[in-house]
Amino acid sequence: MERSLGYFTDEELSCSCCGRNEFNPQFLILLNAIREACGPLPVSSGYRCPNHPIEAKKTNGPGEHSTGLAVDIAVSGYRAHRLIEVAVQFGIPRIGVNQKGSQRFIHLGINEDFPNPTIWSY
């Protein structure tokens, strides 16, 4: 039986290297509410297993994506601004901003084991 993911697909929330999906169901509910307010949110990175190349190269061990409590949304310009505005309204405590180059995205995270509230740029 397939679980309901609302506006998102299992494929876009799963690890791109192994296919596992340990995306947190409570975070998914919150993400769907944010999507309701913002319109389409193209996921560029959802859950990443600890062996995912991005996670494996981190010197302090796997990051927030490996907890299932973070997502990167491929938006820029006005849509990035709107997403940040709505994310703050919904209480998202961790926001990363990458708005340079061709791979622009906004990171949203809710893991309380990482510093928060915080905002950073890549």
Image (cartoon, rainbow, N blue to C red):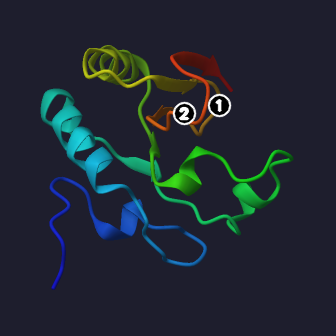
Residue 104 bears which disc, if any?
2
Whether label 1 touches label 2, CB < 8 Å: yes
Question: Is 47 positioned to the left or the right of 31 in the image?
Answer: right
Judging by the rendered image, the residue that carries numbered circle 1 is 101
Q: Which residue is farthest bottom?
A: 1
What's under tag 2, amino acid-wise? Arg
Please, is residue 8 above or below residue 2 in the view?
A: above
What's under tag 1, amino acid-wise? Gly
Residue at 45% across, 46% down: 69
Residue at 63% across, 25% down: 100
Q: Which residue is farthest front?
A: 113
Residue 66 at what x, y percent from top left?
A: 58, 56
Categorize mark 1 by other alpha carbons within 10 Å: few (<14), some (14-19), many (20+): few
Residue 92 at what x, y percent from top left?
A: 37, 25
Q: Work out which quarter of the rendered image holds the C terminus and state it.
A: top right
Question: Is 26 positioned to the left or the right of 102 in the image?
Answer: left
Please, is residue 46 above or below residue 30 in the view?
A: below
Count of all numbered marks drawn on residues in the image: 2
Residue at 31% across, 14% down: 85
Please, is residue 105 above or below residue 70 in the view?
A: above
Q: Nearer the viewer, residue 83 or 99?
A: 83
Residue at 60% across, 33% down: 114
Categorize mark 2 by other alpha carbons within 10 Å: few (<14), some (14-19), many (20+): some
Residue 57 bears which disc, if any?
none
Instruction: Measure how far apart labels 1 and 2 are at the Cα level.
Output: 7 Å
Residue 1 at what x, y percent from top left?
A: 15, 85
Question: Is 87 positioned to the left or the right of 64 in the image?
Answer: left
Please, is residue 12 above or below residue 60 in the view?
A: below
Q: SS class of the residue under badge 2?
A: loop
Residue 120 at what x, y percent from top left?
A: 62, 19
Q: SS class of the residue under badge 1?
A: loop
